[in-house]
Image: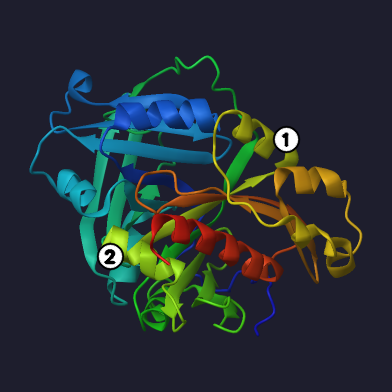
Amino acid sequence: MTSPEVLAQPAQDFLPLKGTDFVEFYVGNAKQSAYYYQAAFGYELVAYAGPETGLRDRASYVLQQGKIRIVLTTSLLPDSEISEHVRQHGDGVKVMALLVDDARQSYEETTKRGARSAFEPYTIEDEHGSVTMAGIYTYGESIHTFVERNNYTGPFMPGFVAKTSLVPQGAPVGLLHIDHCVGNVGWGEMNTWITFYEDVMGFKLLITFDDDDISTEYSALMSKVVSNGNGFVKFPINEPAEGKKKSQIEEYLDYYHSPGVQHIAIATNDIRSTVTELRRRGVEFLSVPGAYYDDLLERIGAIDEDLQSLKDLNLLVDRDEEGYLLQIFTKPVEDRPTVFYEIIQRKGAKSFGKGNFKALFESIEREQALRGNL
């Protein structure tokens, strides 16, 4: 198995990325979704676009916490691309936007290497400056938008106005930045998309997990992780593997009806505090049996945290050559068993919790069984 490491910046990085600019969800009701993310996850409402700003076909709410920015967009028309996306997939991620210094060059470098164009570069302006964007398709109907905002000082981008949160209980919970964003693809498609990220976007293969690494008695999957040159952007890609019963990836594909984003991992510096508050606000998490903790310290070694506090919160721990990490996964955040979140605290570790896969996937299978989908 490839050793996990943050790859050094190559001498000639044709697609230098500064990180994730925003993640946009297409949803059935953006106003209500925005309230949920403020009240439950502690995001701050910072910008809005809709009929009041001259946008006739949609409404978008921009939420922020730490360096994380999510955009929730809903259609005001019954027959739009947005409405069709929600009809087909339910609430889900449409755009993973990447911050760049030059959106036109990013578009040209990727399309000439085979990327399918979503939209050509264009620039929008207002009194706060200008933003240039361009887009390419990745797996399913998902899009990578290149965002160049070096000359913009407004709340989000032209066409949006500043908006203030009106949710009194929605204080931040310690979420810092997006650690990685995971995609699910169909049977036999993982290597196709790994090659896409390598050849089209200049990413490098960081780590590989096969069905021996990620399997239970009933189901299995395979996964590979790619990272851009500076390690700021990481995309694990999952595909199903043969098992006795239906895997979580198959369940996702059955309900999302195409490849798409499965979960977004968000970093925190104090996972116990973050998860305690999220639980208090009603966010539901997967659970593992108490037996997971019986030999945890023998498997992991010394850690800073009190074992009982981890058990009380159902936090998972794993270690690699660089240190250890703590992680936990929410249940799906919509009615379809599709998109969920991972909360992760890295204490040196650069890996993805391989030692927790079996316990985690067994907990997912318990939820699948309750839904009648195992």
In-image side of 118 versus 341 (left or right): left
**Image height of 151 relative to 332, above or below:** above
In-image side of 319 versus 187 (left or right): right
Residue denoted by label 1: 273
The image's mark for residue 336 is none
Say which quarter of the image contains residue 25.
top left
Q: Quadrant of the N terminus?
A: bottom right
In-image side of 27 versus 82 (left or right): right
**Image height of 126 relative to 342, above or below:** above
Q: Residues within 10 Å of mark 2 (few under 14, many from 20)?
A: some
269, 148: nearer the viewer: 269
Distance in Å between CA atoms under marks 2 and 1: 36 Å
What residue is rendered at 49% in x and 62% in y?
16
What residue is rendered at 26% in x and 63% in y?
257
Say whether marks 2 and 1 touch (CB < 8 Å).
Answer: no
By what rule are the colours in the image chosen? rainbow
Q: Quadrant of the C terminus?
A: bottom left
Q: Is residue 6 visible?
A: no
Residue denoted by label 2: 258
Pinpoint residue 40: horizontal percent, then vertical percent. 52, 30
153, 273: nearer the viewer: 273
Q: Amino acid at mark 2?
A: Ser
Q: Amino acid at mark 1?
A: Ser
| Helix, strand or loop status at disc 2 | loop
Which comes before the other along the chain, label 2 or label 1?
2
Pinpoint residue 231: horizontal percent, then vertical percent. 60, 63
| Helix, strand or loop status at disc 1 | helix
What residue is rendered at 28% in x and 76% in y?
114
